Image: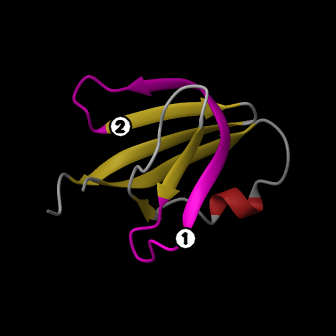
Amino acid sequence: MTVYEIADINRNTGKQEADSLRIGRQYYIGILEKDTRAVLPHVDDQTKALVTSPVTDIKRSDNGKEIVFTTKHTTYTLRKVVDDLS
């Protein structure tokens, strides 16, 4: 599985402190589709996951190393760390 880390979180409203703790954490992409909630299981504990509100937009970099996705209140930037662990 490909591993991503959260490189940046920009929240339109609400507390920034909780979001800043997620920066640098590593996740797999469980579900990342427009109009559905993103589900990103933690690499170090797959019983836990980051679950967002429904995704409104997804942009992938041309080289495939970065994904930026937006929900109603937040924009997340994911950076690829490891290509495939299997």
Side of 72 relative to 85 (left or right): right
Q: Residue 52 location, x and y as percent?
A: 65, 46
Side of 36 relative to 28 (left or right): right
Neighbour tally class for label 1: few under 14, some 14-19, many 20 plus, Cα within 10 Å: few
Q: Quarter of the image for the N terminus: give it.
A: bottom left
Taking the view exactly as shown, the residue that stands out farthest to the right is 14
Q: Residue 31 location, x and y as percent?
A: 46, 44
Q: Is residue 17 above or below residue 8?
A: below
Q: Is residue 38 above or below residue 16?
A: above
The CA distance from mark 2 to mark 1 is 23 Å
Q: Which residues are magenta?
A: 41-65
Residue type beneath disc 2: Glu
Q: Secondary structure at mark 1?
A: loop
Q: Could you say which disc has been placed on residue 48 in the image?
A: 1
Q: Quarter of the image for the C terminus: give it.
A: bottom left
Q: Give the residue at x 51% y 74%.
A: 47
Neighbour tally class for label 2: few under 14, some 14-19, many 20 plus, Cα within 10 Å: some
Q: Which of 2/21 is in front?
A: 2
Q: Secondary structure at mark 2?
A: strand
Q: Which residue is mark 2?
A: 66
For discs 2 and 1, the disc positioned in front in the rendered view: 1
Q: Is residue 75 above or below residue 79?
A: above
Q: Give the residue at x 53% y 50%.
A: 39
Could you tell which of marks 2 and 1 lies nearer the N-terminus? 1
